[in-house]
Image (cartoon, rainbow, N blue to C red):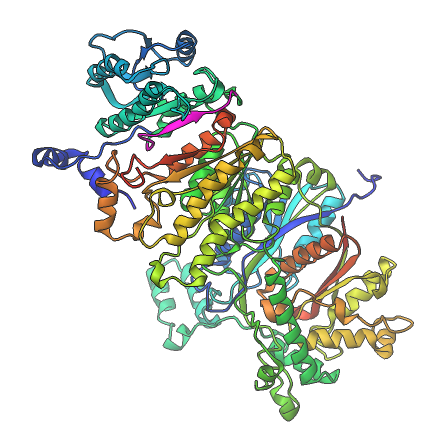
Amino acid sequence: MADKYLELVNSGMTKKLAKLLGLPRPPRLRRFGVDTPLLPGPVLVLGTSARAQELSDTMVSWGLDVRRHDAGESKLGGLVLLLDELSHPEQLSALMLATGAALRKLVPGARVVSVSKPALANDEPALAAVRQGIDGAMRSLGREMRGGATANGIVLAGDTSIVSPSALGALRFFFSGRSAYVDGQFLTVRTEAGELPEDFRKPLAGKVAVVTGAARGIGAEIARTLARDGAKVVLVDMPQAGDALAKVANQVGGTTLQLDVTAKDAGQRIMDHALTRHGSLDLVVHNAGITRDKLLANMDAARWDSVIAVNIASQLRMNEVFLAAKLPGLRVVSLASTSGIAGNRGQTNYAASKGGVIGMVRASAALFAENGGSITAVAPGFIETEMTAKIPLGTRTVARLVLPSLMQGGLPVDVAEAIGFLGSGAAAGLNGQTLRVCGQSLVGA
Amino acid sequence: MADQPVRHAVIIGGNRIPFARSNTAYVNVSNQDMFTAALEGLVARFGLQGQHIGAVSGGAVLKHSKDFNLMRECVLGSSLDAATPAYDVQMACATGMEAIGSLANKIKLGQLDSAIGGGVDTTSDAPIVVSESLRAILLELSRARSTKAKLSALAKIRPAHLAPSAPGTGEPRTGMSMGEHQAITTHAWGITREAQDELALASHKNLAAAYDRGFFDDLITAFNGLAKDNNLRADSSMDKLAKLKPAFGKSLGEQATMTAANSTPLTDGASAVLLGSEDYAQENDLPMLANFVDFEAAAVDFVHGSEGLLMAPAYATARLLKRNNLSFEDFDFFEIHEAFAGTVLATLKAWESEEFCREKLGLDGPLGTVDRAKLNVNGSSLAAGHPFAATGGRLIASTAKMLHEKGSGRALISVCAAGGQGVVAILEARK
């Protein structure tokens, strides 16, 4: 499962050899640890914004070394580009060139985060042009980043400000190792809703989370990550996976609930278990999913229908139960896939289900917001799991190395971190969105 | 403490691993592996990680001498607090019943707030002992001080001594297997082949239906690649069963009726049941499925032929009902362990017999007829298999869930055991 190539080009003799031969060298990514710093160095804030001072003060309160002007020769751990007041593409020049000058000071694992506004159909043409232009510039910058550094953006919709809970939550997420495999992506802050955790070390403290498909792979890692973040976790999987499920549950101090998510009463049983055994239901992660790949010409009803039943129909049915129960502040995070965005050969059924998740999430946002909740999705790209380990070595290496800006596959924990963030109170203003965790893969770009 | 009223002992839930026919799915696993797995599944289901449980009690019928502290070793290998005490119990096939019943009593008395009882058995990883004569020589060797004495002890070993003796299910005092004993009883009570096959078929059908409706979703945790009892034959039929040749009752010739299908196979498996006081369950937000009301053991003299080997539960039931002032009409479920179909049917017939109930049980008349619609409604040992010490835990957890689903009523559980023993128990539903 491990990416041996990444190990080889990053250690000892083989590292020197790889350098000499000019082989592509995928970087080691900076991942999250409870006691690791938020950024690997000072953060430079470029540009102006209405509440830039409040933003700087907040970042200082997070323990960051915040610079408002060019930091001279000192190394930088992060760059924040305030671009939300620009009104014409000609104004981009100064900030982008200053950014370019600062890039060489970035340490490995650094973060660049832009702050902008959405380009809308009824905007002045020049305003829409600069705003859409920022999208293109940042995605290109993502491809130019080195040493595991990433570039992502926060888009402030409507009257939302950079110091709203979800904007600050997104900024922290992009800064931290939690977003190690998120690159070239934008999160749009749509409302001022949400709250930041009292303790950033335990953002899910006191919350009860349900994870379906939790026995192995990404699901097991989600359960571990949510438990690390303070949640009490209910682990759901098929009875056939019960022993693996129990092992994970006993590692994370959770409880098991064996059921088939396609069962009519699955939503009710999940809710009953969470409420009677743990007193509340605060987060549901719809992770259970299957693949039954086949070219459409060779597809049969069993393959098509089972993928739709497990990957999307079950989620729709369970969500109806949760909505009807009016659970206060319930957060739902679903697993989509870059296949559902870009398509993938042999996966018409899977992509239909995963594209379906993206549509469901967008269309359910208002319904969940009625009770103070939210629904979002994470679309993983190439993730190193038991499932992807079965892909032939050549294809796998291409998928890891050539396609994503970060030149490697992601780890299950990268998906889990994004879910932990979207499942927290800080994500309320991001309702309805799908976040890609793909290392900025070309697929679905 | 002496004047305090006893409190309820509540069955919170259970967990078992799927039962596997001997030498199939669990060939390479030990009793310790299996019971630890059952325990870990229980811990996971009820979130008991790191908890200090009052006591864990259970055992195995076929047990290696190295497993003298089997339950304690399993606790140490589990996610429970290592400060959880554990002890082994052994009462042949009634091991689980005795372990759980005694734990319930301790909860009732206030000596324990929480407890886990159960059992485990394997005939795939059974202990094999050396012959008695070799054992005597080896002991002599270990006592020998001088080299000469050691050599002289060693010189006594002959090739024939090396033949191991595997354990059997034979009764030490009669040399007869359990099946041969039951064959006598089955014949004596005039139980037909057809009646036995019908009971076996019902067991398979009922167990299959229970799986289909998800009844075992919170009673079983998959283990070693197995997710369902592999003795289960959902597609069994009377025609298929009728084709089998008798396996027991060779001395009965044409009148032998007991086959491999209406007798339980040798089986590997483990089960565990979580019990507690009402306070314990409430404080930990745990379900309360049923009260463990009472239990009773009995034994019969099968050696001198005055009673059948597996008839003790008939006696225990009479005493238990009398003590609790109950009759068969007061019960909604009867869970009678299917060691053999003949055992269940002979027991039912005995309870209907005025003569037996007057003369053997000392009653005024028959104990009564068990409504077959209430008997083993989710299948029993003929379909699930019977890993000796694990059967009690299987029965108690499943029965408690059945009562909880119904929301009212009582259940009688009966388990026969080697040595002419048996244990029966009463559970009472909690809403």
Q: Is residue A276 above or below residue A110?
A: below
Write the residue at 21% across / 35% down. Answer: A26
Write the residue at 60% across / 30% down. Answer: A370
The quadrant of the picture occupied by the C terminus of chain A is top left
Q: Is residue A261 above or below residue A73?
A: below
Tell me the quarter of the picture where residue A410 sits: top left
Q: Is residue B225 above or below residue A361?
A: below
Main SS class of the magenta portion in the image: loop
- Report the label total: 0
Relative to residue A354, is residue B408 drawn left or right?
A: right
* Residue stretch rendered in magenta on the structure: A181-192
Magenta stretch containing residue A189, yes or no? yes
Image coordinates of residue A122 in percent, x first then y, are 42, 23
The residue nearer to you, when weighing A443 against B97, is A443
Tell me the quarter of the picture where residue B355 sits: bottom right
Image coordinates of residue B264 in percent, x first then y, are 60, 73
Relative to residue B274, is residue A205 drawn left or right?
A: left
Image coordinates of residue A312 in percent, x first then y, are 49, 48
Q: Is residue A302 visible?
A: yes
The residue nearer to you, when weighing A400 against B377, is A400
Tell me the quarter of the picture where residue B265 sits: bottom right
